Image (tube, rainbow, N blue to C red):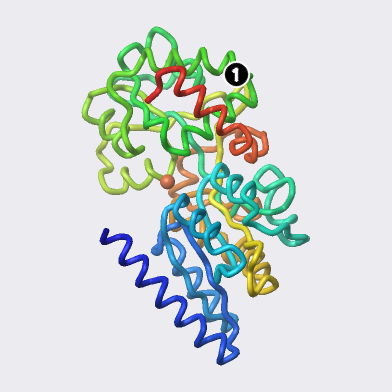
């Protein structure tokens, strides 16, 4: 309830401000963001200071923002949608909410596998979903691949986040793209058989359970590991990069697209281009301990310290394309 009313108030304010600024003819942009305020506001402020463009924004979870964009249709004030996970970006594009952009700048700054093949969304930061293990009870030599977490040696020692969240849906979708449904189902069932306990609601809980001795290995996004270790550096946890002699680590993106009904489409493209630039990339990726999508920008030293690794080269749009299949597969495998 509280969340809804706060959201409503913000929207009203946004609408009012939008009209006032539009009337005054001031340049402005409206952003809907599933990325949290503290991660994006510094970028908006930097861009406003540089270009004199006011950026109005609301933040919410990816699902509600998409519902809102559909409901608003052509009347939406939103110029840009910023969200996490290629699965969510794919869904927004599939629902016809994003416009295709022909931008040589974005083509140059965002590697092909991190953008929509039809140019309706672009990755802005890269996150790796990898194995985390107990440094007390596991030697890294015992680890190899995501798939091998289904081996007998991990019986009763594996912790996973729920299959209801998009990150694991995308991970499994990418496995389907690589291995096919039958093989993937076999591995997912083996994970379920090895679970130490019911899946957790988030990645941090997975790591805390490993730290507390409830289980020994898990799969998490690297930035959650970075955040937790910053808070408690004594936790006996480490990251492992799996599938290094094969497909590589599963990587995903947070990214953005210009809305189909944007009122300031040119300004929105310019802003998106700036977000992919060397100047903005550091701010965008480092704030959340992610990897810059622009290969000319180096990751934050805290992130670089986790080591280099081979990434899965498949286009992340597969995570969206195969998501419905992944959800059904996980359901059939008894992965809650
Ligand atoms: Fe996250």
Q: Position of residue 125 (x, y in %)?
A: 55, 51
> Hey, which residue is sitting farthest top in the picture?
152
Q: Where in the figure is residue 317, as x and y percent of width and height? A: 64, 40
Q: Residue at x 57, y 74 (%)?
A: 29
> From the viewer's perspective, is 271 left or right of 330?
right
Q: Residue at x 32, y 43 (%)?
A: 229
Q: Secondary structure at mark 1?
A: helix
Residue at which label 1 appears: 181
Vertical relation: 64 (above or below) 259: above
Residue sitting at 45 percent across and 14 percent down? 189
Q: Quadrant of residue 277?
A: bottom right
| Residue 67, above or below 247 | below
Q: Please indicate whether residue 60 sits to the left or right of residue 66 in the image.
A: left
In front here: 198 or 307?
198
Q: Nearer the viewer, residue 88 or 260?
A: 260
Q: Nearer the viewer, residue 39 or 267?
A: 267
């Amino acid at each position: 309830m509280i969340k809804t009313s706060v959201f409503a108030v913000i929207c009203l304010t946004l609408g009012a401000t939008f009209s006032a600024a539009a009337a005054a003819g001031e340049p402005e942009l409206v952003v809907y963001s599933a990325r949290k305020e503290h991660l994006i506001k510094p970028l908006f402020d930097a861009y406003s200071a540089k270009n004199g463009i006011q950026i109005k924004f609301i933040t919410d979870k990816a699902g509600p923002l998409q519902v809102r964009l559909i409901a608003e249709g052509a009347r939406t004030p939103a110029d840009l949608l910023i969200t996490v996970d290629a699965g969510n970006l794919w869904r927004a594009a599939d629902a016809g909410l994003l416009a295709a952009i022909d931008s040589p700048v974005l083509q140059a700054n965002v590697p092909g596998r991190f953008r929509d093949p039809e140019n309706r969304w672009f990755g802005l930061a890269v996150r790796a979903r990898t194995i985390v293990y107990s440094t007390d009870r596991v030697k890294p030599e015992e680890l190899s691949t995501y798939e091998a977490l289904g081996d007998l040696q991990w019986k009763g020692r594996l912790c996973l986040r729920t299959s209801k969240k998009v990150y694991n849906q995308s991970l499994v979708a990418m496995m389907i793209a690589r291995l096919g449904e039958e093989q993937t189902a076999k591995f997912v069932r083996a994970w379920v058989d090895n679970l130490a306990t019911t899946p957790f609601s988030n990645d941090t809980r997975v790591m805390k359970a490993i730290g507390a001795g409830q289980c020994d290995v898990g799969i998490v996004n690297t930035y959650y590991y970075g955040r937790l270790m910053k808070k408690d550096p004594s936790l006996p946890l480490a990251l492992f990069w799996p599938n290094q002699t094969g497909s590589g680590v599963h990587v995903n993106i947070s990214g953005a697209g210009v809305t189909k009904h944007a009122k300031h489409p040119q300004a929105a493209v310019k802003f998106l281009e700036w977000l992919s630039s060397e100047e903005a990339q550091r701010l965008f990726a480092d704030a959340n301990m992610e990897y810059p999508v622009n290969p000319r920008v180096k990751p934050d030293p805290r992130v670089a310290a986790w080591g280099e690794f081979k990434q899965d080269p498949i286009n992340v749009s597969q995570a969206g394309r195969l998501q419905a299949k992944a959800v059904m597969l996980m359901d059939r495998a008894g992965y809650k």
